């Protein structure tokens, strides 16, 4: 339908038809062909053309044909005759009417003649205030364009400008949404073009690879991702196209260089897809670091559980062995203690001293191993810290001797009044000695460990020092952290110093590291001393009747012999039944009983006596060689507050302290 310049209604109808086309689709690329096909005939033109303009930077602008309608399909196309033309000056800002004359630009005149046109009417298209292009209609003959026709063209140009601006806004919004979705992904995503180069990445990829977005773009994926077998990530087909080298869509393990410069295991998935007329490959990289760390932690926990099970089994075995060893040791230690007083000044004194020393050593070794296997609730009492040190040195003696390390011991001799769990303290000191031994594994000779105890103000201190390489300043603050270790894999758990410090803190003390000038390290365990030494309690006045119940007659007899030195009158029973009968028949001020015996043992005996009232006012003492579980069993039986524990083997000094404590409340 053609509208003439003198037909205002026809021109209005033309504008309405053009507007309907833009309303049908605001995609200007889809709308341009039908709009031009409507505009040309509507304005009685032989051609309708859409051009874009771009500044050249040399004081001119370039016009490029992007759309065209021509009344004669056989006529040469504008886009082929004049695909791009550079014109001096700036793009026009208003409707321009051009007629082919002698004054017409030579190049423009040549184009007009080649296209068979004599005149044109052009309206500029503006997008966001900037010249975007031109919509143009042309006629074969000379023609004057009316203002109404120019108005139609201006309106069409505005509609093109609005459509292009809306399309740009929609594209920007779509890109914003796409980018937000990409960057919200937890996995790294690389978008690869047809050549295998990186076309786009998300924020997770930037974080993983430690390279900014601009630097990653255009890099070959082969330089970023590698398969463990060294094979290619992509392969080129017979058609020359690049495609994933991985069969199927299942993820495979690959390696990338992380932001920290270290290789990082990832799960790689490659998918081909088409975006418009382009073919791209999406590479998804799932970081396996957390999974690997979790798997490693599970393995460590499994090893710790296995070790704990072994320790528990070892503890049970040691408890039984210790019970059997401590009974004869109790007799040997106690009897040699008694003999020392009787043979003093005789030729036998030295021999008895050697027997006593060997027995004491056996006792410390057994107690030390029990301390390492102990799993019961910590129990504090007055202990001699020097004895704890001796036990720790004995426990570790074989290892230090085998390593060729000399161990020097310098003890205070005045630390028998410290309230502590002797097993825990022994374990801490042994751990410090073992750490020193490991630290000097590659140190040159002579290698030395010195263990010393002393009173330091309000604290007792045990220092373990070595002349090894010392602790590096960079890790001093970390050595007490759980699971931190400098030992090779499998040589340590990294919890020794952490547990040792916690033991010290639980005792109200501390564990500190001190550097030694010239090399080496010193660790100092400090424990609080009592504010003032308690005066010895007076022994009970007059003879004290004591009942001793133990199925080991030698142990019972030796205990009776020592207690009689303190002025006690003793009665011995070798079974629970006999002990019950004696306790029911007469009152005893103190009852000693072995923990483990047929017929209920010491706990069963004491519970029966207490229930019957036969032990009213009596001091109850359990004697045991099983220090692993004794305290827990007593506590579980509800006797923790009324029963005193004595460990086998015991010495004359041990029983003298106990007797003094018992007499304090008599």
Image (cartoon, rainbow, N blue to C red):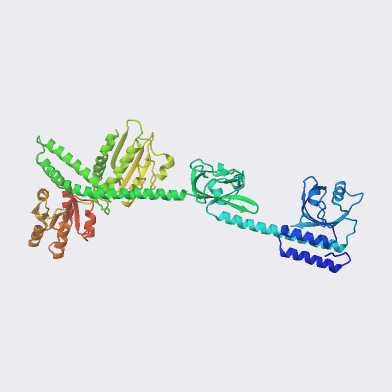
- From the top left corner, tell me how far across and down residue 636 is, in percent: 23, 59
Residue 82, horizontal then vertical, whole percent: 81, 49
Q: Quadrant of the N terminus?
A: bottom right
Please report the residue visible at 11 percent of the width from the left and 52 percent of the height from the top: 551
Q: Quadrant of residue 518?
A: top left
Q: Quadrant of residue 638?
A: bottom left
Q: Residue at x 81, y 67 (%)?
A: 13
Asked whether the viewer can see residue 471, the reply is yes
Where is residue 76 shown, x and y percent of the image?
82, 51
Q: Is residue 34 above or below residue 523?
A: below
Q: Which residue is found at the position 67% from the left and 59% from the top?
A: 170
The quadrant of the picture occupied by the C terminus is bottom left
Residue 318: image location, x then y, percent: 22, 47
Residue 589 located left or right of residue 412: left
Q: Residue 187 vs residue 115: left or right?
A: left
Q: Nearer the viewer, residue 305 or 136?
A: 136
Res 68 quadrant in image: bottom right
Above or below residue 592? Residue 480 is: above
């Amino acid at each position: 339908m053609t509208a003439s310049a003198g037909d205002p209604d026809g021109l209005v109808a033309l504008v309405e038809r053009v507007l309907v086309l833009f309303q049908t689709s605001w995609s200007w690329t889809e709308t341009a062909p039908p709009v031009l096909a409507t505009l040309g005939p509507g304005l009685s033109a032989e051609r309708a053309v859409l051009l874009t303009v771009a500044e050249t930077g040399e004081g001119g602008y370039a016009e490029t044909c992007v759309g065209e309608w021509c009344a004669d399909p056989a006529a040469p196309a504008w886009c082929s005759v004049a695909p791009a033309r550079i014109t001096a000056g700036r793009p026009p800002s208003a409707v321009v009417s051009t007629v082919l004359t002698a004054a017409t630009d030579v190049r423009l005149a040549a184009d007009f003649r080649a296209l068979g046109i004599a005149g044109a009417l052009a309206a500029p298209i503006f997008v966001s205030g900037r010249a975007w292009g031109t919509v143009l209609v042309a006629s074969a003959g000379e023609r004057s364009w009316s203002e109404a026709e120019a108005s139609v063209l201006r309106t069409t140009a505005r509609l093109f400008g609005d459509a292009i601006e809306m399309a740009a806004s929609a594209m920007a919004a779509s890109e914003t949404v796409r980018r937000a979705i990409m960057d919200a992904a937890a996995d790294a995503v690389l978008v690869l073009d047809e050549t295998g180069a990186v076309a786009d990445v998300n924020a997770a990829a930037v974080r993983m690879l430690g390279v900014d977005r601009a630097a990653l773009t255009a890099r070959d994926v082969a330089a970023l991702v590698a398969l463990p077998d060294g094979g290619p990530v992509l392969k080129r087909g017979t058609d020359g196209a690049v495609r994933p080298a991985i069969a199927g869509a299942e993820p495979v393990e690959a390696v990338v260089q992380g932001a920290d410069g270290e290789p990082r295991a990832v799960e790689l998935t490659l998918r081909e897809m088409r975006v418009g007329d382009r073919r791209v490959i999406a590479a998804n990289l799932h970081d396996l670091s957390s999974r690997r760390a979790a798997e490693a932690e599970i393995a460590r926990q499994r090893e710790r559980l296995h070790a704990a099970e072994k320790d528990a089994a070892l503890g049970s075995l040691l408890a039984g062995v210790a019970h059997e060893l401590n009974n004869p040791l109790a007799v040997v230690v106690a009897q040699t203690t008694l003999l020392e007083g009787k043979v003093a000044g005789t030729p036998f004194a030295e021999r008895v001293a050697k027997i006593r020393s060997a027995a004491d050593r056996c006792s410390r070794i057994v107690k030390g191993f029990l301390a390492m296997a102990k799993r019961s609730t910590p129990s504090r009492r007055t202990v001699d810290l020097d004895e704890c040190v001796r036990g720790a040195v004995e426990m570790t003696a074989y290892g230090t001797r085998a390593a060729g390390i000399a161990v020097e011991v310098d003890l205070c001799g005045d630390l028998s009044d410290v309230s502590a769990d002797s097993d825990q303290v022994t374990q801490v000191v042994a751990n410090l000695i073992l750490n020193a031994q490991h630290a000097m594994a590659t140190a040159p000779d002579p290698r030395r460990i010195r263990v010393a105890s002393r009173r330091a103000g309000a604290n007792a201190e045990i220092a373990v020092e070595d002349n090894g390489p010392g602790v590096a300043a960079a890790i001093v603050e970390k050595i007490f952290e759980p699971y931190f270790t400098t030992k090779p894999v499998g040589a340590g758990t990294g919890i020794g110093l952490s547990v040792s410090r916690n033991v010290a803190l639980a005792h109200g003390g501390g564990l500190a590291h001190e550097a030694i000038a010239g090399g080496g390290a010193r660790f100092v365990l400090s424990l609080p001393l009592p504010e003032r030494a308690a005066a010895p309690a007076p022994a009970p006045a007059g003879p004290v009747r004591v009942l001793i119940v133990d199925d080991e007659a030698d142990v019972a007899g030796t205990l009776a012999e020592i207690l009689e030195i303190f002025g006690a009158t003793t009665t011995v029973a070798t079974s629970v039944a006999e002990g019950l009968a004696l306790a029911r028949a007469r009152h005893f001020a103190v009852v000693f009983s072995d923990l483990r015996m047929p017929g209920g043992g010491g706990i069963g005996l004491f519970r029966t006596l207490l229930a019957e009232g036969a032990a009213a006012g009596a001091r109850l003492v359990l004697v045991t060689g099983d220090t692993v579980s004794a305290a827990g069993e007593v506590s579980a039986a509800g006797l923790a507050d009324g029963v005193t524990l004595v460990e086998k083997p015991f010495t004359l000094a041990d029983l003298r302290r106990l007797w003094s404590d018992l007499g304090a409340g008599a």
